[in-house]
Amino acid sequence: MTKQDDFSEAHLRWLVESRSENQRVALSLFLLLRTYRRIIRQNPNLTNTVQGLVAATFSLWRAVFLSDSEGDSIKLIEDAEIFLGNLIRDNAVAYLQDRNAREWTFTYYVNNARYRLEVTSQQTPEIVPPKMVERLSREPKEDWTYYHLALTQAVENLTKILDH
């Protein structure tokens, strides 16, 4: 299935701004890991929290590139079939396969970020308050933005705790 790429000014501006925001959070998290490496390694709860935040950061980083999906459940199932067919045929998945099945892959990456934030919330609610990961019905870019804001707040909360 050939998909139409969104080259609208609004989408391209959203892409650049969202990627920049994600990179800022990634840098903050990286600097926390570097600065508090010993403390994080010695505390299994912090280690798990940081792993969850890194996973959410990566998932949202990848999802932003796939954000010109439509949130169409029929296309999502079609793309799931395409994705699995390529996985079986090629025994490999790279960005091009993600891009060609973006209705499914965008949803996968955003849902993975949500899942990692939810698990982190259960383990460390002081870093990821449960209300930050409530699931509401939104559009694809709104989903990404919602969970990215939750990630940003979680990294800020972790920074406050480690800086204490």
Image (cartoon, rainbow, N blue to C red):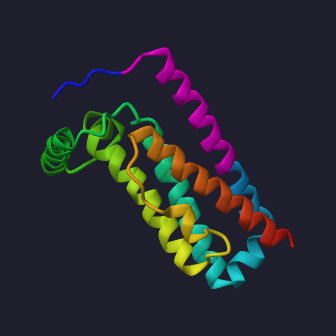
For the stretch drawn in magenta, the main secondary structure is helix
Please tell me in which quadrant of the rendered image residue 115 appears: bottom left
Quarter in which the N terminus is drawn = top left
- Report the side of 30 relative to 52 (left or right): right
Q: Is residue 69 left or right of residue 161?
A: left
Residue 62 location (% of width, % of height): 45, 44
Q: Residue 33's quadrant in the figure?
A: bottom right
Location of residue 60 in the rendering, given as x and y in whole percent from the top left corner: 49, 48
Which image quarter: residue 52? bottom right
Q: Is residue 81 above or below residue 125?
A: above
Residue 16 colored in magenta in the image: yes
Name the foreground residue: 71 vs 84: 71
Q: Is residue 3 left or right of residue 10?
A: left
Residue 49: % across, % down: 60, 72
Q: Is residue 67 visible?
A: yes
- Residue extent of the magenta highlight: 6-26
Asked if the stretch drawn in magenta spans residue 11, the answer is: yes
Q: Residue at x 70, y 49 (%)?
A: 27
Tell me which residue sits at (33%, 42%) in the image.
94
Q: Quadrant of the C terminus?
A: bottom right
Work out which residue is located at the far right of the displayed protein and give it.
Answer: 164
Looking at the image, how many numbered discs can be counted on the residues?
0
* Residue at position x 52%, y 53% in the image: 147
The residue located at (14%, 51%) in the rendering is 88
145 horizontally vs 137: left or right: right
Task: Note whether 122 is above or below 163 in the view shown.
Answer: below
Work out whether residue 62 can be spotted. no
